[in-house]
Image (tube, helix red, strand yellow):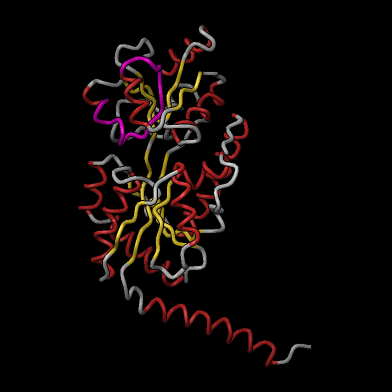
Amino acid sequence: MKTAAHIVLPMLIVMGGWAAGAHAASDYPSRPIRIIVPFPAGQGADILARLLGEQLGRELGQSVVVENKAGAGGVIGTAAAARAAPDGYTLYMGSSGPLAISPSVYKAVGYDAVKDFAPITNVASVTQVMVTAPESKLDSIAALIAQAKQRAGALQYGSGGNGTTSHLTMELFMQRAGLALNHVPYKGSPQAMVDVIAGRVDVMFDAIPGVLANVKSGKLKALAVSSSQRSPFLPDVPTVAESGIRDFSTVGWIGLLAPAGTDTPIIERLHTAVTKILHTDATRDRMATLAFTPIGDTPSQFAQFIRTEVGLWAKVAATAGVKME
């Protein structure tokens, strides 16, 4: 039989733990914060981390430093962030590649995307768009499907490398459309884009921010966007679903996380600060010029979203047989 002491003691322990966390949050931050970005400077996650970091520093009253830890498609920096102390002073700007795709395509990444991180908020979505050379006879998804079936094995698609978002997005498209195109991986999307523009590779998916200028200038032709709705940045370009592949919908994303075990009050304070920044007109205008769509969901919503994404890309990778050392 449980006595009153048996009941009260665990409650006191829980309350004491919450009080300690709340006290830590009240003093937080008392020193500079770093945001690990697992990609080189200038890429989408880096741009957003610096945009947020500058304003987050003003909001929290401490400097925020962006630290680039690039390599292995984001795996190296992500593993480093997962191992960091869960004290709120190391944050991580994660994205769909290293968090949702890499765990399924690499033999070992050194982290668990669901268990090793405490999501703060999904910062922005990044729609993918399928592009081809302006002189290409591929004027639509329907034309692509017809050509691929008529000339089996003849069409090629480029990507930023094996296991990248651009690679797996095309694999998903081919699975949904029942097609087989030849994959030509590059060491990065910019290199792949050069050959698409020149007509040496037929098509590729890439994030809108990376191709928007070339589409607007006529150096590239956009066939369809990957999202469920048309992009405000390319309003005249249909979705893949509109083009006949009705069960196709996916976007890239970039979000802010902390190492698992970070006190809940600290996560809540960071969430409040970041979402406040995301709702300012200045931030939204700046993100619009970069072709990012702000999100700002709750930690629990972001956590569920990551679990869904991990499951989706695990199935795509397994079906396509994509596996890397």
Give x and y (percent) for residue 231.
33, 34
For residue 132, side relative to residue 166 (left or right): left
Give x and y (percent) for residue 65.
29, 60
Q: Residue sitting at 48 percent across and 21 percent down?
A: 244
Give x and y (percent) for residue 129.
37, 29
Residue closer to the observer: 298 or 185: 185
The stretch in magenta equals 198-214
Residue closer to the observer: 151 or 269: 151
Q: Which quadrant is the C terminus positioned in?
A: top right
Q: Is residue 295 above or below residue 289?
A: below
Residue 210 in magenta stretch: yes
Q: Is residue 229 above or below residue 1?
A: above
Q: Residue sitting at 41 percent across and 78 percent down?
A: 24
* Tally of marks: 0
**Which of the 4 image quadrants contains residue 44?**
top left
**Which of the 4 image quadrants contains residue 323?**
top right
Q: Residue sitting at 45 percent across and 36 percent down?
A: 165
Give x and y (percent) for residue 218.
24, 20
